[in-house]
Image (cartoon, rainbow, N blue to C red):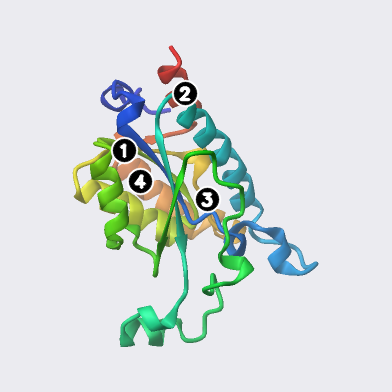
Amino acid sequence: MNAEPESFLDLDPRHVAVLMVDFQNDFCSPAVFAGRAPTNTHNAIAAHRANDFARRAAAVGATVIYTRQILDLERLNPRQRRAERDSRLCLKGSWGAELFAEPVAGSHVISKDRYDCWQRPELVEALERRQIDGLVTCGVELVCCVLYTVLGADERGYDYLVPSDLVSGQDPGDDTDNRAVRDFLRFNQPRHVIESASMILTAWNA
């Protein structure tokens, strides 16, 4: 396990936001497989764990923000429309685009057009309004939306943590692309990665 990230844990939780990235039915619910063997079981586990963490974090003053990827071709530029023309994931108005777990009380939900939540001014404004200095990133999918969120936080100078038990991707990627992203974060940004979110709650409840 990495050394305790003291600078982050010294932050007042009232200046920390928990970013719940794209825990949506299309990514997390076994129902999308219509009786076939699901490949998102680890996403579902991470979603439930993250929601429990978010509830506990909110109880000590942290801000909780859920992001949702909503596919609306009219909001995309021509290149993006070409890239998404065959996609049915998280279509606007669909059950698949809805959040997998009930948002915790007092949380905020921000919709985005593709992978990068930092493209939404509403997110940046919400963080600035609440004087947020630290972020806890939870979410799916590791290879795209989670990675964009982490790199965007780094670019903007936030202190942040990525609990390994609260991020996930599709099950078949655990030994390939999901592992590659976990390794990248572990080796490239070691002080920002922790094995379990319980370390954060322990510090905040000390």
Could you give the CA–CA distance between mark 3 and mark 2, rounded to whole angstroms? 20 Å
Could you give the CA–CA distance between mark 4 and mark 1, rounded to whole angstroms? 12 Å
Q: Which mark is residue 168?
A: 3
Residue at (40, 47) in percent of width and height: 183
**Mark 4 or 1: the one toward you:** 1
66 displayed left or right of 4: right
Q: SS of the residue at dot 2?
A: helix
Could you give the CA–CA distance between mark 2 and mark 4, rounded to whole angstroms? 22 Å
Q: Position of residue 65 (x, y in %)?
A: 42, 46
Could you give the CA–CA distance between mark 4 and mark 3, rounded to whole angstroms? 13 Å
**Residue underneath mark 2:** 201
Q: SS of the residue at dot 3?
A: loop
- Asked if marks 3 and 1 touch (Cβ < 8 Å), the reply is no
Residue at (50, 26) in percent of width and height: 198
Q: Which mark is residue 160?
A: 1
Q: For the residue carrying disc 3, how many other residues have a C-alpha within 10 Å: few (<14), some (14-19), or many (20+)?
A: many
Q: In the depicted view, which residue is nearer to us: 2 or 101?
A: 101
Q: SS of the residue at dot 1?
A: strand
Q: Position of residue 97 (x, y in %)?
A: 56, 66
Q: Position of residue 190 (x, y in %)?
A: 32, 37
Q: Amino acid at mark 2?
A: Leu
Could you give the CA–CA distance between mark 2 and mark 1, rounded to whole angstroms? 15 Å
Q: Amino acid at mark 1?
A: Tyr
Q: Amino acid at mark 4?
A: Leu
Q: Is residue 94 above or below residue 175?
A: below
In the rendered structure, which disc, 4 or 1, sits on the residue that comes first in sequence?
Answer: 1
Q: For the residue carrying disc 2, how many other residues have a C-alpha within 10 Å: few (<14), some (14-19), or many (20+)?
A: some
**Mark 3 or 1: the one toward you:** 1
- Tell me the quarter of the image containing the C terminus: top left
In the rendered structure, which disc, 2 or 1, sits on the residue that comes first in sequence?
Answer: 1
